[in-house]
Amino acid sequence: MIKALTIALVVVSILIILFVIMQPSKSNAASTLTGGGDDGTVKQKARGFEAFLIRSTTVLGIAFFVIAIALAYFSAK
């Protein structure tokens, strides 16, 4: 059981890293360097592939914590 949970935790960790890297940047690098605030753009809801990445990252994050807690519980026994 512990071996299976460890493998699942490693797989979920790698998937989280990949999904976070694939997400597009939310801010303009030049405006953050100069301390500039809002540039007047309207925030839009994520659609399509970006929405899929956000949802998947959230689900994987929850799965990571559930597996980590289960692994800690079973390894303590």
Image (spheres, rainbow, N blue to C red):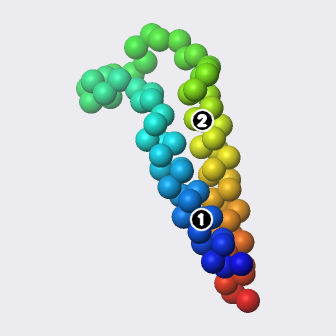
Residue 8 horizontal/vertical position (percent): 62, 64
Q: Which of marks 1 and 2 is nearer the N terminus?
A: 1
- Residue 7 against residue 75 in the figure, above or below: above
Q: Which residue is drawn at 54% across and 64% down?
A: 10
Residue 73 horizontal/vertical position (percent): 72, 79
Quarter assignment of residue 12: bottom right
In this rendered view, identify the residue nearer to me: 37 or 7: 7
| Amino acid tagged 1 | Leu
Q: Residue at x 54, y 50 (%)?
A: 16
Q: Which residue is drawn at 70% across and 62% down?
A: 66
Left or right of 26? Residue 13 is right
Left or right of 74? Residue 20 is left
Q: Which mark is residue 71?
A: none
| Amino acid tagged 2 | Ile
Quarter that holds the C terminus: bottom right
Q: How crowded is mark 1: few (under 14 residues within 10 Å), some or many (20 or more)?
A: some
Q: Residue at x 62, y 32 (%)?
A: 52
Residue 2 horizontal/vertical position (percent): 66, 79
Q: Which mark is residue 54?
A: 2
Say which element carries label 1: helix
* Separation of residues labelled 1 and 2 (CA atoms): 19 Å
Q: Nearer the viewer, mark 1 or mark 2?
A: 1
For mark 1, what is the residue?
Answer: 9
